Amino acid sequence: MLIHALAALVLTVAAPVPAPTRPSVVDAASIDAVVRAYLDATRIPGVAVAVTRGRAVVHTSGYGHTAAGDAVTDHTVMAVASLSKSVTALAVMQLVDAGRVALDAPARRYLPEFTMADDRAAAITVRQLLDQTSGMSDRTYQSFSGPPLHTLREAVASMRTARLTTAPGTRYAYHNPNYQVAARLVEVVSGQSFDAYLRHHVFRPLGMADSSTADTADDLPPSGRGHRMVAGMAVAVPEPPAFGNGSGGVLSTARDLAAWLITQNSQGRGPDGTPVVSPASVAEMHRSSAVRSSYGLGWDIGETPSGAPLVEHTGGLITVTAYQALLPTSGYGIAVLANAGDQYGDAPALGAHLIDLLEGRPSSPPAPPTPLIGIDVVLLLLSLGAVYPSVRGVRRSRHWAGHHRLRPATVARLLPYLLPVLLLSTIHDVVSFLYRGRDISWLQAVYLYPTFTLLLGVAASGCVAVVVARLLRATQVMAADRRPGTQAADTPTTPVA
């Protein structure tokens, strides 16, 4: 995007932040040094981190504060966003292990209510939901900008009028509703709510006592809410309304995620050896799909900078970010939860610094947020500056009306003043285009670009005020001209010779 491109250009001349000296041993102190250096550079208000190796917890801790002002600890409940997809995938694989679901069977066999306005949807398999090759996409079904949803049942029902973008199994498209359908399938097959199922079959067996799920952003606890950065200041704001259970609704802690990482790196066995899923199912989740080599079942598949295998997933709501990574060769696991959006730094970037540490590789200094702060300041100043021409235009509307008659051509010349209004009302469509078709609501777009939206809002309000004032004055002048023996004020006159 233009703002990000400008930030990248300015960043090339920004003063570097010294990187902490890398210790010879990866322990709590060395991890702590990397995290604190990153937070000092990026100004993220709060972060929780977990690092494991094999069946051992290397380090769990919290840093900074929550949106409510409390200290973040390794027991602070935070939103894990799209890391939830790996949890949903495990729940489905448990049903596969139990013989209650077949991975390559049509999803509709287990979830008859899953129908779409496309006959091809009957062929969507359970696997295709999990590896994001169902044929559904944000281009044909808008889950964020559409009507509000509150339950998984409602989410699945809302897809009845949608069509597929491609035939099932032919193309990858990251689409949150895939995992909402999968979570609803778990509910129907198990006879339990999705939250109850996870509590009984995943969280409790693994000792994840503080983990649960939220249906919508309104269900986030105070500790799970985040921030947006404005001119270098972290502003605590509520998450914009959205439905996300199954695809992004899990709430957890660094301590609980340590148990989750151990399970993923220990062939499905928790910290105390309790099995929750088979080794074969773990391998299936971590294996590349036939259509896209970089995605498995709820996990991204790739390599670290050193070329070692990497199984990971990023997560991001508008006000929080999250990251998890498994390094199969070394047995390490990483989880990072950050209570701020991705403007000045995020959980995946901090996760990359931790991977550098674990692999014994010098890490680049964290990038300071100076360029983006400057852009915010400029946009705020422009917002203030836009007030003056608006006020001046309104005050001079009487003079303008004295020189223009209310005719269609005159009104047409005022239409360009409404362009800022059009852009403001459709900013979510513009952002969606810039994000390659990903669906986004209008309020989410405002959150993503607060200072730019403020400037646009001030300009739009000013332009509307000027147009309304001119039309009103022109109407008054026209009415005065129709009264016999009167002449509108400010109307040019010809001196009598």
Image (cartoon, rainbow, N blue to C red):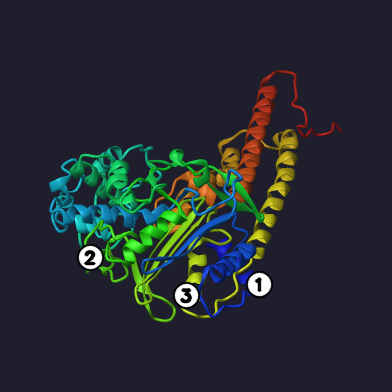
Question: Front-most of 49 and 371?
Answer: 49
Residue 182: x %, y % from top left: 25, 50
In this rendering, the label closer to the viewer, 1 or 2: 2
3D distance between C-alphas at marks 3 and 2: 25 Å
Amino acid type at mark 1: Val
- Above or below 19: residue 371: above
Q: Which residue corresponds to mark 3?
A: 358
Mark 1 to mark 2 CA distance (whole Å):
43 Å
Point 64% across, 27% down: residue: 475
Percent position (x, y) of residue 332?
Answer: 40, 71
The mark that comes first in sequence, 3 or 2, is: 2
Kindly give the residue lying farthest to the right in the view shown: 497
Number of marks present in the image shown: 3
For label 1, count other residues whose C-alpha is less than 10 Å away and answer few (under 14), some (14-19) or many (20+). Answer: some
Examine the rendered structure and indicate whether residue 115 appears above or below residue 231.
Answer: above
SS at circle 2? helix
| Residue 279 badge | 2
Residue 492, horizontal then vertical, whole percent = 77, 34
Mark identifier at residue 310: none
- The mark that comes first in sequence, 1 or 2, is 1
Q: Is 273 above or below relative to 146?
A: below
Q: Is residue 114 visible?
A: no
Q: Amino acid at mark 3?
A: Leu
When asked about the image quadrant of residue 83, the answer is: bottom left
Residue appearing at x 30%, y 51% in the figure: 205
Picture quadrant of residue 145 = top left
In the figure, residue 167 lies in which quadrant? bottom left
* Residue 54 location (% of width, % of height): 36, 69
The amino acid beneath tag 2 is Pro
Q: Is residue 67 left or right of residue 124?
A: right
Residue 17 marker: 1
